[in-house]
Image (cartoon, rainbow, N blue to C red):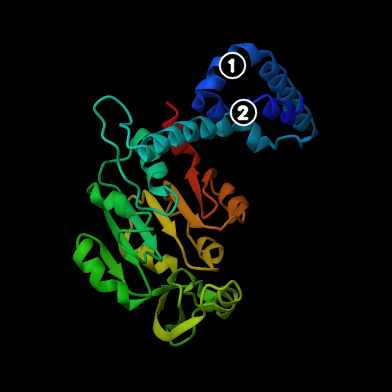
Amino acid sequence: MDLNNLRARGISPTPRGRVANPIRRLLWPFNAPYYGALLAEIDALRLQIRAQQPRPTQRERADPDIDAIRKDLMAIAHRLASLEERGEPAGPGEAARPSYAQCGEDRIVAYLLRIAGAPQAIRYLDIGAAIPDGDNNTFLFYRDGGSGVLVEAEPAYLPAYAALRPRDAVEAVAVVPAARRPPGGTVEVLLAENPGWTSVLPERIEEAARLGKGGLRERITVPAATIGEILDRHFAGQELHLLSLDVEGIDEEVVREIDFARYRPWVIVIETMGAPGPEAFLAGHGYALYADTHVNRIFVRRDVLERAAH
């Protein structure tokens, strides 16, 4: 089936176009056979691709429904997000709720945690918190009664944390892997003209300049800490529902230092900017990729996904 032929007839190849245009809606019954043929070809192609894929491992065979669970939950989350964008209630008696994250990550996670049975006042760790109430993955949960720890190396954000998020503990440190922490316990942080590129890595500032996003604004020296130290100080013996990680270029190194025998966040949100991130590593510790917004990837503990599906 040639999609160009469908377009030439004025019929959109997408369900959104089909229902959005009244003329197309009227013509739909007459063109349904074309769509039937198209869907049949898609199904055949899907079977062909599946036949060429490698056989599942023993672990994957033991968890055959994880991918289906993830897809079903994501479909519901996307519908919820689209209703909120239009300002429509998500259901009878429910008011539309805003998102404070870059790409709606907080709403995706909030929906998942709710149906998985998390408490209303969740506990979170936000590493690289930056703006306390915008482009932030945890402010929605603070607003709903949750609390946690904000970790941020740039001192300029600290007064806003005190004003807007007084329930949260604040760590004014740079989180680095143990191998990158200098002997003196402090590390140089390179503040970028575009705050989203601030990093301990000189190559990140150079890349920002190449991309026209500004270069170096200032160099500061701040205390350094590992993620293990942060977890031990604030979450020893406690539940951690959400770990949000944005440390500009060293995210995967930091994740690999988590002691998953002691700390098992329900959900981990990692800035990956389209890259796979530590997907294989986290899969080995019982996490599945749940969503990818291009900016961030959301990983969920498999038992949490299974609880959300029932």
Mark 1 lies on residue: 28
Q: Amino acid at mark 2?
A: Ser
Where residue 65 appears, x then y in whole percent?
A: 57, 29
Q: Please identify the quarter of the rendering in which residue 118 is found.
A: top left
Where residue 111 appears, x then y in whole percent?
A: 37, 38
- Of the pair 24 and 170, the residue shown nearer to us: 24
Quarter of the image for the N terminus: give it: top right
Q: Is residue 3 left or right of residue 123?
A: right
Q: Residue at x 56, y 21 (%)?
A: 24
Q: Amino acid at mark 1?
A: Trp
Q: Secondary structure at mark 1?
A: helix
Q: Residue at x 70, y 28 (%)?
A: 8
Q: CA distance from mark 2 to mark 1?
A: 10 Å
Mark yes or no: residue 208 visible.
yes
Q: Secondary structure at mark 2?
A: loop
Which class describes the residues within 10 Å of circle 1: few (<14), some (14-19), or many (20+)? Answer: some
The reply to whether the C-beta atoms of the residues labelled 2 and 1 are less than 8 Å apart is no
- Of the pair 280 and 155, the residue shown nearer to us: 155
Where residue 163 appears, x then y in whole percent?
A: 19, 66
Measured along the vertical axis of the image, is residue 53 above or below residue 208?
above
Mark yes or no: residue 260 visible.
no
Mark 2 lies on residue: 12
